[in-house]
Image (cartoon, rainbow, N blue to C red):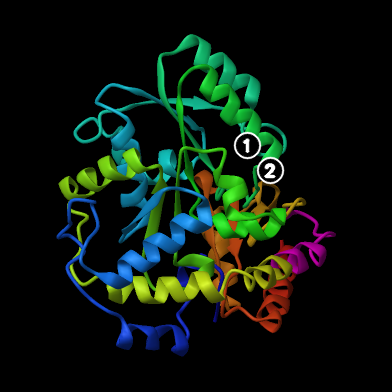
Amino acid sequence: MIDLRSDTLSLPEEEMLKTILHAKLGDDGRTNENGRGEDLTVNELEDFAAKLTGKDGSILFSSGTLANTTAILTYCNPNDKVLVDEIQHIYKSEKVVFEKSLGQLIPVTYKLNKRKTPDINDIRNLLNENNIKLLCIENPHNFAGGTCINLEELKEIYKLAKEFNVHVHMDGARLFNAVVSLGVKAEDICKYVDSVMFCLSKGLGAPIGSLLCGNKDFIKKARIKRKLLGGNMRQAGIIAAPGLYALQNNIDTLKQDHENARYVVDNLKDLKKTKVQKDVQTNIVMLDIRETGLTAEKYCAIAKEKGLLIRSVLGGNKVRLVFYRGISRNDTIIAAKIIKDIDSLI
């Protein structure tokens, strides 16, 4: 069975797992006057992540959801308005900061343009019309098919936000896919946001963990929020060691996942009813199945019968394929053939 439901299914290699055996462990939740914990491996990872993103510091979290939640609640208070796009992961899937019984924040949604990046004019109008506390962007954008916001657009968005004294937080769960796709450094992207979250899992292949990066004052406040949210961890070096290995060894290999995604698109150009995403920039490929006459659930069920696991997104009109470590070119060839077979049967 070829499983393309998500890159969260990537598995750590043996050399990555061996790093756990030699990790220097301690109580990461027991901090000193500088806010640093006692787990030396966590500290090493956090310093490395801060350097990669060009920020003052970073904090290790068990998940991207908790990291994003902590970031937003560090900036905002109940009833503050937060700008998010209509299909952003923070808004569509994580949601906790907008729950009335929890975060109590108010979402104000902006549109994406034809390139599936933030519509700068819509953001400007919303900033003019609302008392916005925080602007959230996603780069690359999951439900938009892994599209990337380039440096020119990021600079324009950041400049606009600063005109209104609004902070910018970036959900960069797949940040290094954007790094590889755009051919830039992580710090080049992150200079145009005030804070960024990225995952160690997904394409990087670590088993667990996400980093939240930002300036000194933000990181200090975010550590306090993390503790309030139950996010402190003890001997978290067992998470940090594989994560450090991933950042030091696995960034360049993301290119292979992008190439596999493009291979599928190049080989599915002439389908009758399944519309394939054209501008594939990273490791995600979206299929529009509205013209097939099938529900997304049925489409995925047929694929499963043929040996391919995929999933529906965005209310059932779209099906997503995600390529990651462990998915070979031969797997990719077979996956493309299965999609062709399904389309020919409709």
Q: Is residue 5 visible?
A: no
Q: Which residue is mark 1?
A: 154
Q: Residue at x 44, y 55 (%)?
A: 50
Q: Is residue 96 left or right of residue 245?
A: left
Name the image quarter holding residue 48: bottom left
> Going by the picture, which residue comes out furthest to the top?
129
In magenta, the rendered stretch is 261-276
Q: Is residue 241 magenta?
A: no
Quarter of the image where the N terminus is located: bottom right
The picture quadrant where one finds residue 186 is bottom right
Q: Residue furthest right?
A: 270
Mark 1, Cα crowd under 10 Å, few <14 / some 14-19 / many 20+, is: many
Is the Cβ of the residue at disc 2 closer than 8 Å to that at disc 1?
yes
Q: Residue at x 64, y 62 (%)?
A: 283
| In this rendering, position of residue 216 left or right of residue 137 | left
| Residue 32, x across and y down, in percent | 17, 56
- Residue 211, position as x, y percentages in the image: 39, 56
**C-alpha distance separating marks 2 and 1:** 6 Å
Q: Is residue 293 above or below residue 159?
A: below
The residue at which mark 2 appears reads as: 150
Closest to the observer, 281 or 317: 281
Please state if 291 lies on the left or on the right of 294 as rendered: right
| 164 versus 305 height, above or below | above
Q: Amino acid at mark 2?
A: Asn
Disc 1 marks a residue whose amino acid type is Leu
Front residue of 106 and 12: 12
- Residue 266, given in percent of the width and then of the height, sits at 82, 64
Whole-percent x and y of residue 301?
53, 67
Asked if the stretch drawn in magenta spans residue 264, the answer is yes
- Residue at horizontal 46 percent and vertical 20 percent from the top: 165
Please tell me whether residue 4 is drawn above or below residue 161 in the rendered image. below
